[in-house]
Amino acid sequence: MNSLFQDIRYGLRTLLKNPSFTVVAVLALTLGIGANATVITLANSILFKNLPFADSERILYISGVNRSNSQNILNISLSDYRDFAAQTRSFQSLGAFSYGTASLADGGGFPIEYRDAKITANGFSVIGQKPIIGRDFLPQDAQFGAPPVAILGYGIWETRYAKDPAVIGKVIHLNDVSTTVIGVMPRGFSFPDENGLWLPLVVTPDLERRQSHPLRLFGRLAPGANLKTANVEMDGIARRLEAANPDTNKDRAVVVQTFNDAQFRGQIRVVFLALLGAVGFVLLIACANVANLLLARAVSRSREISVRVALGASRWRIVRQLLIESLMLSAAGGIIGTALAFCGVRIFDRAVTPNGKPAFLIFAMDYQVLAYIAVLALGTGILFGLAPALRLSNLDINSTLKDGTRGSGSGRHSRYLSAALVVSEMALAVVLLSGAGLMIRSFLNVASKPIGVDSNNVLTAQINLRGAKYKSTDSQLAFFQQLQTRLQALPGVEYAALTSRLPAGGSVTYNYELEGSPAADARTRPEVEAIVVTPDYFPVMKLFPVQGRSFTSQDGISGVPVVIVNRSFAEKFFARQDPLGKRLHVVKRHFDATGAAVDEIQPWLTIVGVVPDVIQERIEDPAVPLLYFPLRQEPQSGFCVALRTSVPPGTLANSLRREVQLADENLPVNQPETMANLLLQRSWPWRVFGSMFAIFAVIALILASVGLYGVIGHSVSQRTQEIGVRVALGASSGRILRLVFVQGMRQLAIGMAIGLAAAFAVTRVVNGLLVGVSSTDPTTFVIVAVVLLAAGILGCLIPARRAVRVDPVIALRHD
């Protein structure tokens, strides 16, 4: 231990004696470790961390899946749930839930719509959670006809009721139904998703039918059971249910998953895996950089090490001393990098929270993350310190001591390893810059992509009609007419419209048939997207017909049913014909009392207009064929309000709420937002993740350039005498520049060639995340090559200029 402490003290003195070297090395490691610590903290919360309550790793989700094509079905019937609960041995208990929304009104402020979860009476006991005040659900609460009850989330209790314990027993209106509050859940609790309140899963006659599949399941693993055994057992039960109920359970399997696997699938996993790969490259570049610095420093220390060996120091003692110095560097980089990561996580959290981050998703450094960072710092220190340590511990002390203080022999031995490290840095930088370039171009494509409407000066909101008084289409249409008249009269409103979906907000899919086309059965009938709008929707969005007309106030009341199509639909089906006057009908599917699907063919619709294309689905997707139905022809219980204003639209949000309240005091207005902000929120993944890739790419570029500069600069300092001799013998400045540049450009060219080949393969991983650009886009790779070449030239230029200015007299005296 005494000798170990001596090595630590000596290493600290050595590092303090070389502050420039120490600062550069620690800075490189700080960037590499800090980037990794940031991303692993985020990835841990999304990909690995379980639910935020005790023993949550034993709570698993059970989802339905189609056995024939492996597509998620997600929902399971109540009868199947009961059979799974009765037959399983892998789970101590099973619960079930379904999602929904509930409008809360109590006379204490504007009504608000919350996301609810209808959960079985045993649901909270399955996960081991209890209300902090009040009681849990009882089996009798789930009986059909039982008095309605609800459990509130802590957020509602805090913001709406000021944490008043007297809320227990209070009667509130949920979806216009008088409901008694029986409990409040703990702060931060949110299960099974982003829920504001919970209702009992009432067993209705419709729910009893095996054909009805509204539920998702969860359960607590039994002692001794694990994810694999639970999957095998539940699959066996599903097969038995399929054999016993072929009509309702054909091809229905189940899959048991962890919470993270069930919640975060598809692209979000690919994004974070790509980020983990990106920061891994950053760390490798940082390690190669520091290893090169240590190799360069090793040349000047070769005489010191040789003297220590000559005095009896063992090879292990030399290696230990050098590794301790490396570990001290990595420890400093790890500590500062952790602080940097803490700031990075806070910035990321602030960036995504306004865009709807779930409450259960907490980005924080837990003990697992801190342990990972500690192991990362330790491994990094060994990784970049081992090669220089082994090189110095294996010196030929006779030749080194004969070389005097120049260390030329050691420099010659280290040159090839140093060049290999630079080539590796360049190759890694090319791969990282290529992936980042593709992500940045995707973000720019999304940001600049025209959506097809004018989103400026448009205020939007969503309203859902609930309760017995809105069950008939007549009552819905009467409310729409009254509300639209009120909104149109607001000062500053130019047009007021209603629509089933806003641009980039999705649509409804219908089967359809064109008049005159061959008859098709239910399985081969084509599909088309559609939305429902009022006549003023088109002037609100500045979406003017290119053929025919818009809707009028009479469409849908009487006469011939009509439809407006977009340009994509007209070009696809009527490329050489006039679409106006052509007819089509849609097919609606519903389920009868036995649960069997019934297709209902609707009346023929006459095309009266063609409008420009609008991005109606995801903002990153292209426009698709789309139908527009008049609202009076297709009444809706849920709709979006869109107001075109002559004043800043955000200033009318409270006016919009008041007008809805005057029409119905229990009706909430959801998400009043300007359309410009709404579209900006929908593009946030490309903004946030594109920025992160860009930051990591810039770090990698700086580290790679500094690494090349360090190697070339060290090479010039080691070849000072040689350069002085060349100058004394008449070598021109151009030849000296070429001498230095050839060395640097050779390493850069090899690294770029290897990196471009690797990038063509690696970037395919993010292909599903790209918008408007291919994973092998030549423009991106050319830009990356040019940027890296420019950085490489800059890295060689400073040492080259120093070489040109070498004074032969001083150089020949160089020691």
Image (cartoon, grey):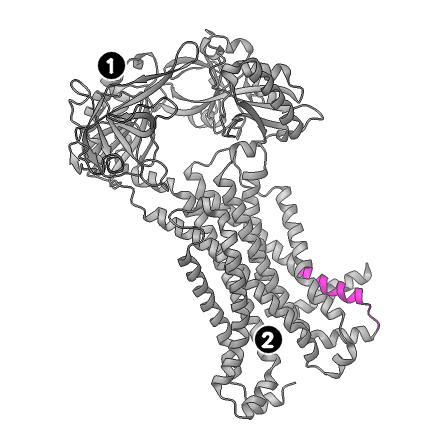
For the question of whether residue 506 can be seen, the reply is yes
Residue 149 vs 345, above or below: the answer is above
Q: Residue furthest right?
A: 312
Where residue 292 sits in the image (x, y, percent)? 62, 67
Q: Quadrant of the C terminus?
A: bottom right
- Residue positioned 41% across, 9% down in the render: 593
- What kind of residue is marked 1? Asp
Where residue 583 sits in the image (x, y, percent)? 21, 26
Where residue 208 sits in the image (x, y, percent)? 49, 10
Q: Quadrant of the N terminus?
A: bottom right
**Sequence order check, earlier mark of 2 and 1:** 1
Residue 406 vs 461, above or below: the answer is below
Q: Is residue 649 left or right of residue 733?
A: left
Packing grade of label 2 (10 A; few <14, some 14-19, many >=20) is: many
Label 2: state its secondary structure: helix
- Residue positioned 49% across, 49% down in the render: 764
- Residue positioned 40% across, 58% down in the render: 779
Q: CA distance from mark 2 to mark 1?
A: 84 Å
Q: Nearer the viewer, residue 801 or 313?
A: 801
Q: Is residue 215 left or right of residue 626?
A: right
The stretch in magenta equals 312-328
- What kind of residue is marked 2? His
Where residue 80 sits in the image (x, y, percent)? 55, 16
Q: Which residue is mark 2?
A: 714
Residue 643 lies in magenta, yes or no? no
Residue 129 vs 457, above or below: the answer is above
Q: Is residue 601 left or right of residue 102?
A: left
Q: Which residue is mark 1?
A: 474
For the question of whether residue 136 can be seen, the reply is no
Q: Quadrant of residue 813?
A: bottom right
- Residue positioned 33% across, 30% down in the render: 507
